[in-house]
């Protein structure tokens, strides 16, 4: 379960990685927040983190956490929704192989 404190720390770690030039962190920011500035500050990273977790803004994420609502990344929500309907194709992932490995 995510807490506001954990989310704040995660945003700060992500910002440090961005400032260090980490390619994965940069790509992650572009995916989550395509309009992010070239030199993001903490509020930009917080916004991206909130969007990754299915919220429109950092304020919405904070409100959700205050209410005790558990959020999941988009990919997890697709899988959970697909599991609920039995339609694995809607998850956006290939179904796991049923073949046994030797």
Image (spheres, helix red, strand yellow):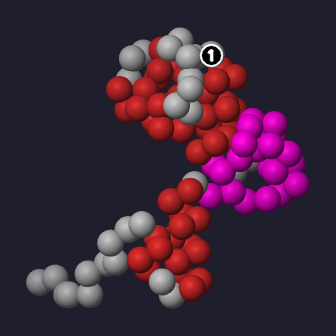
Outermost residue to the top: 39
Q: Quadrant of the N terminus?
A: bottom right
Residue 12 lies left or right of residue 22; in this view the side is right
Q: Residues within 10 Å of mark 1 (few under 14, many from 20)?
A: some
Q: Secondary structure at mark 1?
A: loop
- Residue at position x 62%, y 16% in the image: 41
The residues colored magenta run 53-72
- Residue at position x 50%, y 14% in the image: 38
- Residue at position x 80%, y 43% in the image: 60
Residue 100 placement (x, y as % from top left)? 19, 87
Q: Nearer the viewer, residue 2 or 44?
A: 44
Question: Can the viewer see residue 100?
Answer: yes
Residue 4 lies left or right of residue 46; in this view the side is right
Q: Quadrant of the C terminus?
A: bottom left
- Residue at position x 26%, y 81% in the image: 97
> Could you say which quadrant of the image residue 20 lies in?
top left
The residue pinned by badge 1 equals 41
Relative vertical location of residue 29 with respect to residue 52 in this rendering, above or below:
above
Residue 95 lies left or right of residue 13; in this view the side is left
Per the image, is 63 magenta?
A: yes
């Amino acid at each position: 379960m995510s807490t506001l404190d954990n989310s704040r720390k995660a945003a700060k770690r992500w910002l440090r990685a961005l400032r260090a030039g980490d390619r994965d962190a940069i790509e992650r920011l572009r995916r989550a927040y395509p309009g992010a500035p070239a030199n993001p500050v903490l509020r930009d990273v917080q916004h991206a983190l909130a969007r990754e977790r299915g919220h429109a803004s950092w304020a919405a994420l904070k409100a959700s956490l205050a209410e005790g609502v558990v959020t999941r990344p988009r990919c997890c929500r697709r899988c959970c929704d697909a599991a609920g309907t039995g339609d694995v194709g809607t998850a956006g992932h290939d179904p796991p192989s049923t073949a046994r490995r030797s």
